[in-house]
Amino acid sequence: MVSQPLISVIVPAKDQAPFIRDSMTSLTRQFEDSAAVEVIVVDDGSTDGTGELASAFTRRLPGLKIIRNETPVGLATARNQGLDSATGRYITYLDGDDWLAPGHLAHVLDSMSTLDVDFVRLDHVRVTRGNRVQHYAPQARRGVPLDPRNDIAPPTKSTMIDYAFAWAGVYSRRMADAGLLRFPDGLFTAEDRPWIWRLHLQAKSYAVVNSPGILYRRGVTTSLTQIVDMRQLDFLPAYAQVFSLVESDRDAELYWPKAARQFVAILAHHLNRASQMPADVAASLRSRAGGVLQLIPDAIRARTLAELDAKRLQSLRTIVATSGRSTR
């Protein structure tokens, strides 16, 4: 038996009754000694008995903790609640509708201990209506320590800063102690964007390692990616925070193009969906987007817009004109 958990797994879950048992069962299959893992389920205002279903695993997971919120506080704050309760030497996240292959965490921690890095990042399998597709982290070099700042640019290619899934990694306790694992409180979506930027800008080392597998369930009807309401617009304050991080960095000129291109691409995506949004959500998107766009330095913004493809540029034309800039 171990006195301190080897790893804390933070599981935010809201109305995940159909899936939470799969998640919890997978966590019982990670180590020979079940006391090595501390599982912290944050039941974020569920009305379907999610917390009670998770509690049934107490005997199989002796380190299990259940935190209950009477009303939902959102994914970011729920993860922070779990982080505040975590005591493990390492920390990771698992969404309440996902699960891990047997021995996944034990394998990853062996690699992490050998490499002695601040955090590791992992590939994942997307499961959509039973179909499984492997998705790889953008960094091809595996099993070697890397500088996380070197894997932010270039703006025109997919890099590790685009691979923002918090659950696709394991993090040293020292990252939590340094405040690098906290999410922006109150955000329901896009909370991982400022989080991944802070991690890559301020951590000292990381690695990408192969692992038995994270299984990520797609297309769940209760997922916020499937629900269109004001919470979808959290990417606007999220990128305001990203821009603040970049602006204060010693190499801001190097990273601004990537941050700007990310935001413009996501903004164009949401504007293309505006016709599917409730009228008040679409109006709020159009009225607020220009202000965030203006946070990008003029030269960077102009160059980013000039490099856009025609479809995205057309989506942004009204926003740019409203914010006082022409796309011509």
Image (cartoon, rainbow, N blue to C red):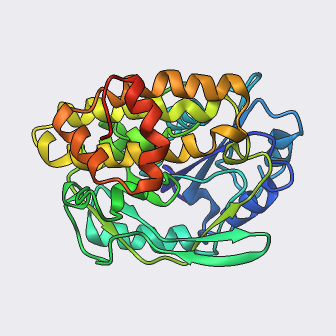
- 176, 133: nearer the viewer: 133
Quadrant housing the C terminus: top left
Image mark count: 0
x 74%, y 58%: residue:
219
- 155, 143: nearer the viewer: 155
In this picture, residue 9 sits left or right of residue 258: right
x 66%, y 62%: residue:
27
- Report x, y in % for residue 226: 72, 47
In this picture, residue 309 sits left or right of residue 278: left
Residue 64, relative to residue 318: is it above or below?
A: below
Residue 29, relative to residue 199: is it above or below?
A: below
Q: For the view shown, which residue lies furthest in the left direction? A: 250
- Report x, y in % for residue 61: 70, 55
Q: For the view shown, which residue lies furthest in the front direction? A: 328
Residue 223, relative to residue 138: is it above or below?
A: above
- Report x, y in % for residue 77: 56, 29
Residue 124, relative to residue 39: is it above or below?
A: below
- Report x, y in % for residue 71: 75, 22
Q: For the view shown, which residue lies furthest in the right direction? A: 48
In this view of the protein, can residue 174 be seen by the observer?
no
Quadrant housing the N terminus: bottom right
In this picture, residue 140 sits left or right of residue 98: left
Based on the displayed image, in which of its 4 quarters is residue 28 positioned?
bottom right
x 35%, y 67%: residue:
112
x 70%, y 61%: residue:
218
In this view of the protein, can residue 27 be seen by the observer?
yes
- 42, 298: nearer the viewer: 298
